[in-house]
Amino acid sequence: MSWAAHEFENYFIQKHTGARVSFLAIVLGTFAPDLFTKYFVYASDNPAKFHRGWPGVGFTHSLIFGFVFAVIILAITKSRSWALGILIGQWAHVLTDFADTAGTMPFFPFSIEPVTISMWKHAAAEGRYGDAAAYYSSLGGVWDFFWFAMVLFFAWRTLRPAYFRSVVVPADPKVWGWLHRKFKLTDSGLFLIYVGFFFYGLGRMTSWFLYARFGARTPFQPVWGGPNYILGNDLSDAGPLEVVIRTSIGGVFFALFLWLCWVLFVRRLWERGIDPPAVQRGEGLRIAFVTESDDPGLKPGPAPPVHGYAQDGPPPAGATPG
Amino acid sequence: MTRRFLPFVLALVVYAVLGVVLKSFVLNWVIGPLFLLLALDVIPRAFGAPPLFTLPPAEAPAEDSPIS
């Protein structure tokens, strides 16, 4: 499992989706696989199997979980940007968790073969503190730092107030407006919520790394498959070829399943879905991903509404005029 | 520039120290994502002090700005 990478990824995804996807939905999507399961994982007899395998709650780390979650959100809210955010965020979590020894079952239930590159050991069997110490003694901690650096070097603009005002808020004016009205938050408070997830990842990375070095005093072993002082938690004895074959078959069936769902009802739900006023969608991948040439929020142009979240209500106290 | 980032650095130090000392599930999973909001905005205002962070005024985008 990843401890802070999931928080950093949100901003990297945000950079590539712009105003077409809700940032808060991306966050909920990346949190979703662990949100309902993590608390119970450490109490389990076989944490790795329970967390990622089947029988267990490993289906939360499959692509179909994100798909079903996104379709339910689309059906209930009609919001395309929320459905896409949930889908992309949850799928990013599944792909990130490939890296530990327990892996994930991306094409569950069509394949229950865990897919992993065994970069570091899944260490939930060590308990919560032992898990944290092991993670930040392995390449897992390096993985977190890698995503932290990726955001700082390639997506730093997403952390700026101007980006928040011109891209993030117009992508989701209703929810930011609701947060503003319900909790009487100023525009500064809303911005602190937005960058708070980045801060949260940095804070967790820092404190658990310090705990590993000076509290648990575990040896720092950033080697492939480390740390070496604990046992591995591989969920499958299958060889690489077997994994590729089973996963490929599962992938084909999963793709067919998605197509069938699209034809039967998802397309209807999508077509009756609605977008925020500022969003224009293209075809294919352009429904979600943007380039600087086709996103008005990313290229020079007329100033967008500064307080888009205030569309349904008065400007927040302390807000500055645009 | 330094003054603008100082509250964030202080909040990070406080969060990291609390994290190492308490190792709390609540701090880690419940308060964590909202810690910045609580530390820099909600708690100071609850005590009648000004928030430790306020957004700079919005400016009209420069022609060569990558972000409008």
Image: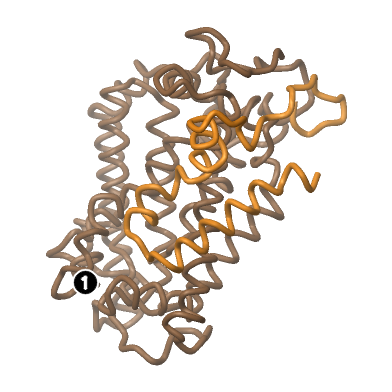
The residue indicated by pointer 1 is: A47
Chain letter belonging to callout 1: A
Residue A149 against residue A294 in the figure, above or below: below
**Residue at x 60%, y 65% (from the top left corner):** A146
Front in this rendered view, residue A236 or A154:
A154
**Residue at x 68%, y 54% (from the top left corner):** A152
> Does dot 1 land on a helix, a strand or a loop?
helix
Type of amino acid at the residue the image marks with label 1: Pro
The quadrant in which residue A77 appears is top left
**Residue at x 30%, y 39% (from the top left corner):** A259
Q: Is residue A9 left or right of residue A242?
A: right
Which quadrant, please, contains the N terminus of chain B? top right
Across the whole image, how many numbered discs are drawn on residues? 1
User: Residue B16 location in percent, x, y?
Assistant: 52, 62
Q: Which of the chains is brown?
A: A
Front in this rendered view, residue B11 or B29:
B11
Residue A309 against residue A53 in the figure, above or below: above
Front in this rendered view, residue A319 or A19:
A319
Q: Residue farthest to the bottom?
A: A229
Q: Residues within 10 Å of mark 1 (few under 14, many from 20)?
A: many
Front in this rendered view, residue A29 or B34:
B34
User: Residue A171 location in percent, x, y?
Assistant: 53, 25
Residue A99 against residue A160 in the figure, above or below: below
How are the residues colored? by chain
Q: Is residue A53 left or right of residue A212?
A: left
Q: Which of the chains is orange?
A: B
User: Residue A242 location in percent, x, y?
Assistant: 29, 77
Q: Is residue A31 left or right of residue B20?
A: left
